[in-house]
Amino acid sequence: MTDWPLIRQRDAELAYLAQYEQHGSTVPFGSHRTGYGWEPDHAVVLAVPGFAARHAAEHATAESGRIVLGPALPAAAAGPDERDVLALLRGAYPYLPTDAERDGADASPTPLMSKARAARRDSRHGLDEARSMERYDELVVGRYSWVPDDTPGGDAAAELGQLPVHWLKDWTLCLDVECGPRPNTSLHRLYGTVTSFESGTCRLGFSPTGGHPAIAVPLRRIVALTGDRQRRTTGQVPTHEPYDSHGAEY
């Protein structure tokens, strides 16, 4: 179920769903405008009796995709299968930190990642010797893509470390990432702000658009970081979208 929690007037007819048990984490699902700006929305997976689930789905018919029914649970089941829960959550937000955690501490970029990164490097326009502020200016407006190293100890981590990362949180950026459990992964573009970079742990702090808490994304899961030339602020950008041909844009 998306647009969680059920606290707005339009949610009154669905408020009874809040009594049922949540399974898995709460994931980002965009935001909504308030009188003071924007507030985050989320998506969750609930274990709901069949009659209640069908009623809720019928009530939300006009809001396409707000309620997605998962597989029915066997009568003797203690709860839903974790794989079904994760699949439903990925339908709302494709990047789940638990997928990266299961890679293993010594995991390397997959062939899918290496190929996508190579394409982005080849499409970049020469800022290799640029000063950090010049590179920063080009990054936030989408004229430059930062691409991580495929192996530890390369120049890319040092390059990002030289940027004024504390200013990046003022800009909506695109983080192109590998999503899903390996080896069955896919590429997606996430929108949000960079909140931190830890060169020692090779992790990037990323806050999904709409004011969501930051999540830690390991560099091995990142294809590239860049800006969006046309869409620059909350309300203009989606929470995420397929990677598709973005790699050829920059």
Image (tube, rainbow, N blue to C red):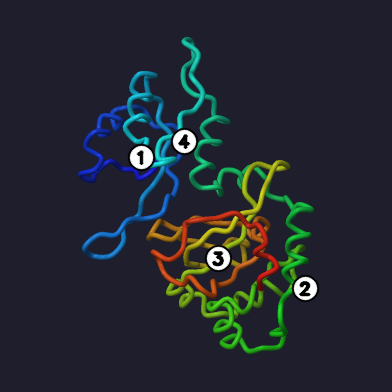
Gap in angstroms between the C-alphas marked 4 and 2: 39 Å
Gap in angstroms between the C-alphas marked 1 and 2: 44 Å
Gap in angstroms between the C-alphas marked 3 and 1: 30 Å
Mark 1 vs mark 4, foreground winner is: 1
Mark 4 is on which residue type? Gly
Residue 178 image position (x, y, % from top left): 65, 53
Q: What residue would you read off at disc 4?
A: 24
Q: Quadrant of residue 157?
A: bottom right
User: Between disc 4 and disc 2, whose residue precedes?
Assistant: 4
Residue 197 image position (x, y, % from top left): 55, 67
User: Between disc 1 and disc 2, whose residue precedes?
Assistant: 1
Gap in angstroms between the C-alphas marked 2 and 3: 18 Å
Position of 172 with respect to 6 (left or right) is: right
Mark 2 is on which residue type? Asp
Q: Which mark is residue 122?
A: 2
For mark 4, does the 10 Å Cα neighbourhood hold few (<14), some (14 to 19), or many (20 or more) residues?
A: some
Q: What residue would you read off at disc 1?
A: 62
User: Between disc 1 and disc 4, whose residue precedes?
Assistant: 4
User: Between disc 3 and disc 4, whose residue precedes?
Assistant: 4
Residue 118 image position (x, y, % from top left): 78, 66
Considering the numbered disc 1 on the image, is that residue within a helix, a strand or a loop? loop
Looking at the image, is 112 positioned above or below residue 20?
below
Considering the numbered disc 4 on the image, is that residue within a helix, a strand or a loop? strand
User: Between disc 3 and disc 1, whose residue precedes?
Assistant: 1
Residue at the location (44% across, 32% down)? 23
**Given contact means CB atoms under 8 Å apart, are the residues at marks 3 and 1 in contact?**
no
Q: What residue would you read off at disc 3?
A: 174
For mark 2, does the 10 Å Cα neighbourhood hold few (<14), some (14 to 19), or many (20 or more) residues?
A: few
Q: Quadrant of the N terminus?
A: top left
Considering the numbered disc 2 on the image, is that residue within a helix, a strand or a loop? helix
Mark 1 is on which residue type? Ala
